[in-house]
Amino acid sequence: MKFTRRDVIRTTAGAAAGAVGGRFLSSSAFAQEGLKYKPEAGAKLRLLRWSPFVQGDEDQWLKNTKRFTEATGVEVRIDKESWEDIRPKAAVAANVGSGPDLMFVWFDDPHQYPDKLLDVTELGDYLGKKYGGWFDGPRQYATREGKFLGLPLATIGNAIVYRESWVKEAGFSEFPKDTAGFLELCKALKAKGHPAGFTHGHGVGDGNNYAHWLLWSHGGKMVDESGKVAINSPETLKAIQYAQELYKTFIPGTESWLDVNNNRAFLAGEVSVIANGISVYNTAKVNKDNDPKLAEIAKDMRTTNMPIGPVGKSVELFQVTTAVIFNYTPYPNAAKAYLQFMFEDPQMPDWITSSAAYCCQTLKTFENNPIWKADPNNAAYAKASATLRTNGYAGPLGYASAATMADYVLVDMFAKAVTGQATPQEAMEEAEKRANRYYRV
Amino acid sequence: MAVPSVAVQRRPSILSRLAESRNSLGFGFMLPAAALLLVFLTYPLGLGVWLSFTDTRIGRPGIFIGIENYQYLWSDGVFWLSVFNTVLYTVSASILKFALGLWLALILNQNLPFKSFFRAVVLLPWVVPTVLSAIAFWWIYDSQFSILSWALQQMGLIDHRINFLGDPTNARASVIAANVWRGIPFVAITLLAGLQTIPQSLYEAATLDGASRWQLFRYVTLPLLTPIIAITMTFSVLFTFTDFQLIYVLTRGGPVNATHLMATLSFQRGIAGGQLGEGAAIAVAMIPFLLAAILFSYFGLQRRRWQQGGGD
């Protein structure tokens, strides 16, 4: 591992801040702040989280954790895994009843093994009341039958990232707000030698974000409110036809793209428009001093929300992460106390600030975080928690919605049609058949 | 006067009798290995088979549902596509690995300068962890940054980048090529070991009888190498059939499931999708193919008459 002077300064500063925080937050002081749970004697916790996409996220989380340890004496070991590997790890932990005490899971994971998770309804209600309530989308992922299976931690926003100069070169003074205008822009960009690039491959995040936007923006849905598969519809057909037209403006190879490909292609100046989290912009910003080409790209980068389709409003999936406690933990009170501490003010707003617009708040009080105005490009990610639509819309979250997404039913439907391997009707019928297997028709 | 000693005939203890018994000693020595096999092989295999007959999901114990999972798979196009991909992947990669591996082994069996060095170098693809070589291939096959596309463009042989992993046919060929690259050393080095066990006197005798180089290979090398080929290719086929890492890193089964193998589909459905029963059913469906490969190897390639140079 390579340590730079900056790392040393940062670590030292973190340790100093931790020491100060520790004194400030003595046990009694912490109790006065409203700690609802008394950690068990000798408690030690292990948290498994996804590897950070923005370094500030991890630094601040560790800093806050250090303060918790100094205030309570509870040691917290934090392990990291690639975000795509969290789901299988959580699944195994839930199934065998052994593993980390706490975990940051994704999407409908809590609904797959609700019986294996510690009920944190009391804490969820307390934090909701104290901080203006939870945003509805993240709350749905974290609750089942009115009970909190975990605490909604963050929404990872997804937005259009584009090169402003190339959009102007294509004859557009501003980025189109609707899907029709967006298609015209992409055609013009392609004609100028600046193709767009959206993931049609098995990228868990980008592939699903793009496919769900295509479907939902045209009024399609995987299932209806009762969980009956409704993908075979005129709206879906329109979405597929729109995707076919848009695909013609893409750089070749997007059907093989995984989550990282669009970032790489964009930062290499190969594509003009992608959809991504703010991390791609942060990468360009952080490395601009070492690379003049990246500095130029960072200066030219702009973000905006995905265009609005015939449904007339913004509807997107986004990745939602929930902090859960497994009920096999020998230290349930310590785990709850830890989560409470990390979600309280000032820890949570500090973490959101340090996450540099990558993590969007789930508690309404924190929506005025200064980070959203710190850079004009951050604004597109500020409302992610407020506008997201849950996976498997309009049906319930659960085994079927999780399995349908994990099997890339929607991603494959669009990919098959845009690459000409099936007609739109055939692709739709195949998706219907595959979804029916999970929704057990 | 010395008291005559009386030899007391004591019955040997049970322990010493067991220690002297050939059967019980053999049983005792086998016990640890048997226990390991039972715990780490038989139990997981049995559990997998059992799970495939249940509707177990992540976090929820299932109930026995008979062959329902298999019925679902029978009518599932993606499953059959994965079966096709797996068979194509295994057969193509195994044939290529055998041909290239044997060729490499024959070359390395000659008296070359720096023989040891070359033999060590050949092992490199096998030594590198699969996931690392898969990441290297990921870059080699990248639709935008492929060094192959770049080189061919620089040489003026192509005018646009090759869509290695985006086109279904290209994607299948690409993952097979990556698997072949990785698997050749195993075949080559094992066959080389086999080649070195063939007595030189046989070649000398055949040469005296006027055998050509092809006849030397056909009637001396090949028959004597066949037992090693059978074992090597059995293992190679098993490794290839159950491959997971290369596909998972390179394509995750895409584009549109064109490279999904049964192993990757089993993981996708069973772990990521939470349908443990169905995932197990896909894994169990691999067993007949694997058994067929083993039986073919043992009863086909190891026929004594063929090994001795005779016909069928």
Image: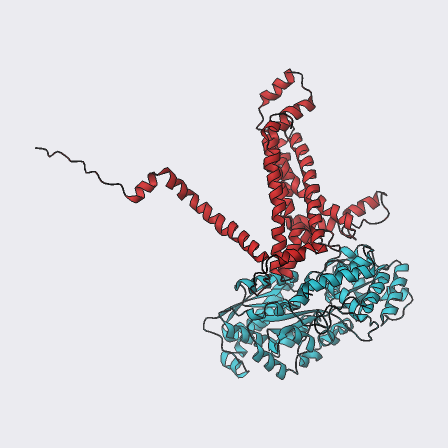
Chain colours: A cyan, B red
For the residue pair A362 and B282, the one nearer the viewer reads as B282
B41, B134: nearer the viewer: B41
> Which residue appears farthest toward the right when viewing the image?
A171
Residue A156 lies, in percent from the top left, at 70, 69
> In the rendered image of this protein, does residue A402 appear above or below residue A387?
above
Q: Is residue A28 left or right of residue A53?
A: left
Image x and y of residue B86, in percent: 68, 48
Quarter occupied by the N terminus of chain B: top left
* Quarter of the figure with the C terminus of chain B: top right
Position of residue A42 in the picture relative to residue A386 (left or right): left
User: Which of B39 and B148 lies nearest the eye of the viewer?
Assistant: B39
Residue B242 located left or right of residue A193: left
The location of residue B160, given as percent across then percent down, is 85, 49
How many numbered discs, if any?
A: 0
Residue A107: where, in percent of width, then height? Answer: 66, 68
Whether residue A16 is visible here, answered yes or no, is no
Q: Residue at x 80, y 75 (%)?
A: A313
| In this view, A271 is above or below B189 | below
- Which residue corresponds to the image point at 64% horizontal and 82% vertical from the top-left? A131
